[in-house]
């Protein structure tokens, strides 16, 4: 069930109405409703994968209590490792099995051996990368004694499967979401106002901006061999905006939807293209993942401790594995590796400016845009071809196709960028922007955004991060 579908609209209106109609706002009944709704939401794609999320829920619920009740540190560590291996095992089988087998075969082919090893047609369960990280952090936090396990199974199961952020995040920590699930939620006008405004902005970013950009550049990225260098350069820059507005749009809808149900999620994006360094970019981009990698991978590896060389190694490994998390392809490994190298270079040569600098901002945007090539290209051969064409001399004029879709894209992108510039210059946060508007201004602005969404909406298209 896609956020940008009519089915979700009907689904959410029904859940929202039943949720706030529960007498005395009884927490247990609300959580049961959210749990059932979340399983319906997830099962809409493929009901068979409900067993996976249920299995992961039961395992980490039991192991979380076992870690806390362990009589020795060694026993607690064994329970923790059982949780980690279970979750990573699910990822390895469903996301990386074919990748590792195919890579092994290709490695032997380099030495002249033709191995005939078949691979399974394993379907990637939607959202598995997100909810496995979420449940792993729960077990790790208990082991570190930063969190006490809950004995409320309904609340924990809802935490794992909560439908607003189940499929593509944000990756919520148990320390933030579980206490909210265990306490009474009451209607809050400001929270609802903020949530509604963020939802409509998220839909605008997805429908009017990201989808219109996709219709322009997909034909270029999918067949780079027949496109000119200028068309490819245009597509490279536009993809930076497509993936940002697509994913931030999803996060906005997720955060806003949770707000309407009485929950506060952490912000997942903070205007990342206004960054003056790669380091700052990763503090602003997909914040729930970057902080997860920092707290549960980079710091355990040693972080900034044990010398400069080890710090660079830790950065490199963290970003390499972060790239692999995004997808079972060497494209993503290279994408993450380049970011790891750049983060190390910034630290080594003190390239991180202390305040905003437009020139640095432009350089970072261009660097990030060029690295996105590995992220968007269908394979390494296409990525190599794109880079080759970008550095050729025969540029000319980019091909823009039909003028109406192109002007639609320019219109939506212009409005979205103007709004982001306003947020940046005024130091405002989208998460609490709604309550800063007067009632008339709020109604006019929301109406304008909704009209634009309805004008440019054609059909429900997948969000880019659903593939991860």
Image (cartoon, rainbow, N blue to C red):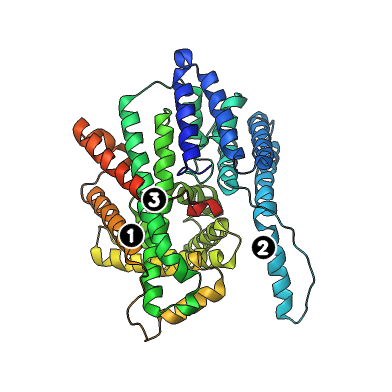
Q: Is residue 146 or residue 289 the one in the foreground?
A: 289
Q: Residues within 10 Å of mark 3 (few under 14, many from 20)?
A: many
Give the side of residue 70 with respect to residue 319, left or right. Answer: right
Q: Residues within 10 Å of mark 2 (few under 14, many from 20)?
A: some
- Rendered residue at 65%/51% (across/down): 91
Q: What residue is pinned by disc 1?
A: 409
Q: What residue is pinned by disc 2?
A: 99
Q: Is residue 348 or residue 82 the one in the foreground?
A: 82
- Rendered residue at 74%/75% (across/down): 108
Q: Residues within 10 Å of mark 1 (few under 14, many from 20)?
A: many
Give the side of residue 297 with respect to residue 208, left or right. Answer: right
Foreground: disc 3 or disc 2: 3
Please indicate, yes or no, whether residue 347 appears anywhere in the rendered image. no
Q: Secondary structure at mark 3?
A: helix
Q: Position of residue 123 (x, y in %)?
A: 67, 52
Q: Position of residue 362 (x, y in %)?
A: 29, 66
Q: What residue is pinned by disc 3?
A: 207
Q: Secondary structure at mark 2?
A: helix
Q: Spatial distance from mark 2 to mark 1, Cα to Cα?
A: 36 Å
Q: Earlier in the sequence, mark 1 or mark 3?
A: 3
Q: Position of residue 73 (x, y in %)?
A: 66, 37
Please indicate, yes or no, whether residue 173 appears anywhere in the rendered image. yes
- Proximity of marks 1 and 3: CB atoms separated by less than 8 Å: no
Q: Secondary structure at mark 1?
A: helix
Q: Position of residue 206 (x, y in %)?
A: 40, 50
- Rendered residue at 53%/44% (across/down): 167
Q: Earlier in the sequence, mark 2 or mark 1?
A: 2
Q: Spatial distance from mark 3 to mark 2, Cα to Cα?
A: 32 Å
Which quadrant of the figure contains the N terminus? top right
Residue at the outermost top position = 24
- What label does residue 118 carry, if any? none
């Amino acid at each position: 069930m896609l956020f940008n579908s009519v089915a979700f609209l009907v689904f959410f209106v029904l859940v929202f109405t039943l949720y706030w109609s529960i007498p005395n706002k009884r927490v247990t009944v609300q959580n049961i409703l959210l749990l059932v709704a979340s399983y319906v939401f997830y099962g809409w794609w493929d009901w068979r994968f409900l067993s996976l999320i249920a299995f992961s829920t039961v395992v980490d619920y039991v192991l979380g209590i076992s870690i806390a009740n362990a009589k020795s540190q060694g026993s607690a560590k064994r329970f923790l490792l059982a949780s980690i291996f279970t979750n990573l095992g699910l990822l390895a089988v469903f996301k990386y099995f074919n990748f590792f087998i195919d890579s092994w075969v290709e490695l032997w082919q380099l030495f002249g051996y033709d191995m005939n090893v078949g691979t399974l047609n394993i379907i990637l369960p939607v959202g598995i990368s997100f909810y496995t990280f979420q449940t792993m952090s729960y077990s790790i936090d208990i082991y570190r004694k930063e969190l006490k396990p809950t004995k409320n199974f309904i609340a924990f199961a809802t935490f794992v499967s909560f439908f607003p952020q189940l499929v593509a995040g944000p990756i919520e920590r148990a320390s933030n979401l579980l206490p909210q699930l265990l306490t009474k939620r009451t209607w809050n006008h400001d929270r609802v106002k903020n949530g509604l405004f963020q939802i409509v902005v998220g839909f605008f970013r997805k429908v009017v901006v990201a989808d219109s950009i996709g219709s322009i550049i997909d034909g270029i990225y999918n067949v780079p061999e027949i496109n000119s260098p200028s068309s490819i350069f245009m597509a490279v820059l536009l993809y930076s905006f497509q993936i940002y507005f697509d994913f931030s749009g999803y996060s906005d809808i997720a955060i806003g939807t949770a707000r309407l149900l009485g929950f506060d999620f952490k912000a997942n994006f903070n205007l990342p293209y206004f960054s003056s360094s790669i380091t700052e970019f990763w503090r602003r981009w997909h914040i729930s993942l970057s902080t997860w990698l920092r707290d549960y991978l980079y710091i355990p590896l040693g972080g900034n401790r044990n010398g400069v060389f080890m710090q660079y190694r830790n950065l490199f490994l963290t970003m390499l594995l972060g790239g692999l998390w995004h997808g079972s392809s060497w494209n993503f490994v290279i994408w993450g590796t380049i970011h790891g190298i750049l983060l190390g270079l910034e630290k080594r040569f003190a390239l991180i400016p202390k305040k905003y600098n437009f020139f640095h901002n432009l350089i970072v945007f261009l660097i990030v845009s060029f690295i996105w090539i590995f992220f968007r290209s269908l394979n390494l051969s296409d990525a190599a071809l794109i880079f080759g064409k970008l550095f050729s001399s025969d540029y000319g004029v980019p091909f823009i196709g039909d003028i109406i879709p192109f002007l639609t894209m320019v219109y939506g992108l212009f409005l979205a960028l103007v709004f982001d510039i306003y947020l940046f210059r005024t130091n405002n946060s989208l998460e609490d922007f709604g309550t800063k508007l007067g009632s008339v201004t709020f109604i006019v602005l929301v109406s304008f955004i909704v009209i634009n969404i309805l004008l440019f909406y054609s059909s429900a298209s997948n969000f880019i991060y659903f593939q991860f």
